[in-house]
């Protein structure tokens, strides 16, 4: 699956547009991680627990978007965008969307 | 410039891959392995309102769609399992009722608003929350609308019973017999009636989803949920008013 945030794919032509595909997730870490992060906040540095949380959320949102593209029989997603929301505190909320297409080699 | 007179390229920083990527990949792989159709159907592209059939075509025979998921689970769910779920849902309203009863109590000026607005809303939601979850997430567990109404009525009755016990033994320990009788008649009738009205809303949501074989539309229940909340709120306001006016003497003011 080709995934790009550009509208076109170099060396490919868009043969078919399948439609909008999207994936979203709202994830949280357990309370222990939140407590550890609050202590880490006192001394500064990377809050690794929250880095992991954001990574998990991004990957899960992407995977769900990819799954939707596969369901449509697409082999590429163009114009991919990420956005966040603020539903609840202490959670990472990611929303990924793009246009599922069938791309064929050749300009 | 090095000692040998050769130009040394500046040292490039060593880029290190984020270890969280590997950990996240492993965690998500485990989650994927545990995931069932019940979770996957919530993300299927075929339920997306933005999908254009002209572009996307129709789903292949092996693809998971909400309709196929629902039909398959209706066929798999036995009558016995359906009855068990109905009984569990009816009983689950009790613990939720405790939370709702706490939300509807208080003794300040703010409690007037709590008593007549927030309390009734929280309680009516709490009474049917379990049944609402089944209707929204696993509608195939119900085989008839009678089961939903039974859940709603039992939810209202269980809620009223728990709330009565809290009032009689915790909030108003020096109660009068008239207060006890009032709680076990009027209050039970109110809670059961309001739950029944909300239950009709649940029934509308479930019936529409089963007829269309499509995800439930919760908005169909709102015309029934709102009256249940309003009737409950008006009842609470009336009891406060008539008690304050001295027309109803049960040994304590309010409900």
Image (cartoon, rainbow, N blue to C red):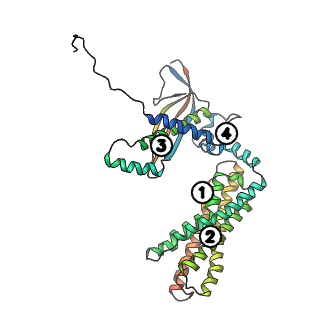
Mark-to-mark CA distance, 2 and 3 = 38 Å
* Separation of marks 4 and 3 at Cα, in angstroms: 24 Å
> What is the residue that sits farthest to the right in this orientation?
B79
Residue under circle 2? B159
Classify mark 1: helix, strand or loop: helix
Q: What residue is pinned by disc 1?
A: B219
| Residue identified by numbered label 4 | B64
Q: Are marks 1 and 2 in contact (CB under 8 Å)?
A: no
On the image, which quarter does residue B20 sit in? Answer: top left
Q: From the viewer's perspective, is residue B34 above or below residue B231?
A: above
Q: Is residue B101 above or below residue A30?
A: below
Determine whether label 2 and label 4 are within 8 Å by CB.
Answer: no
* Relative to B85, A38 lies left or right: left
Disc 2 sits on a residue from what chain?
A: B
Image location (x, y in percent) of residue B138:
67, 52
Give the mark nearer the N terminus: 1 vs 2.
2
Question: Which residue corresponds to mark 3?
Answer: A94
Q: Separation of disc 1 and disc 2 at Cα?
A: 24 Å
């Amino acid at each position: 699956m080709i995934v790009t945030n550009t509208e076109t794919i170099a060396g490919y032509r868009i043969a078919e547009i399948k439609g909008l595909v999207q994936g979203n997730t709202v994830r949280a870490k357990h309370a222990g991680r939140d407590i550890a992060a609050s202590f880490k906040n006192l001394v500064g540095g990377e809050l690794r627990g929250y880095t992991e949380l954001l990574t998990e959320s991004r990957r899960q949102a992407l995977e769900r978007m990819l799954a939707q593209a596969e369901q449509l029989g697409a082999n590429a997603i163009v114009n991919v965008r990420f956005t966040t929301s603020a539903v609840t505190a202490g959670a990472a909320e990611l929303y990924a969307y793009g246009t599922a297409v069938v791309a064929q080699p050749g300009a | 410039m090095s000692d040998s007179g050769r130009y040394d390229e500046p040292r490039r920083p060593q880029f290190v891959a984020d270890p969280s990527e590997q950990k996240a990949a492993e965690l998500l792989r485990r989650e994927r392995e545990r995931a069932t159709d019940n979770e996957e159907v919530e993300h299927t592209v075929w339920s997306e309102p933005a999908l254009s059939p002209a572009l996307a075509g129709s789903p292949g025979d092996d693809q998971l769609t909400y309709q196929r998921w629902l039909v398959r689970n209706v066929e798999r769910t036995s009558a016995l399992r359906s009855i068990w779920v109905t009984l569990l849902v009816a009983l689950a309203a009790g613990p939720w009722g405790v939370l709702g009863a706490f939300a509807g109590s208080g003794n300040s000026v703010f409690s007037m608003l709590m008593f007549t607005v927030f309390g009734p809303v929280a309680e009516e939601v709490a009474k049917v929350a379990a049944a609402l979850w089944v209707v929204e997430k696993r509608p195939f567990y119900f085989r008839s609308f009678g089961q939903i109404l039974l859940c709603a009525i039992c939810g209202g009755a269980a809620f009223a019973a728990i709330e009565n016990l809290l009032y009689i033994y915790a909030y108003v320990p020096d109660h009068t017999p008239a207060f006890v009788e009032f709680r076990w008649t009027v209050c039970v009738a109110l809670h059961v009636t309001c739950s029944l009205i909300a239950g009709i809303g649940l029934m509308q949501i479930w019936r529409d989803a089963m007829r269309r074989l499509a995800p439930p539309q919760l908005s169909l229940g709102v015309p029934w949920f709102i009256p249940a909340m309003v009737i409950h709120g008006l009842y609470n306001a009336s009891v406060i008013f008539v008690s304050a006016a001295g027309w109803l003497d049960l040994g304590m003011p309010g409900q």
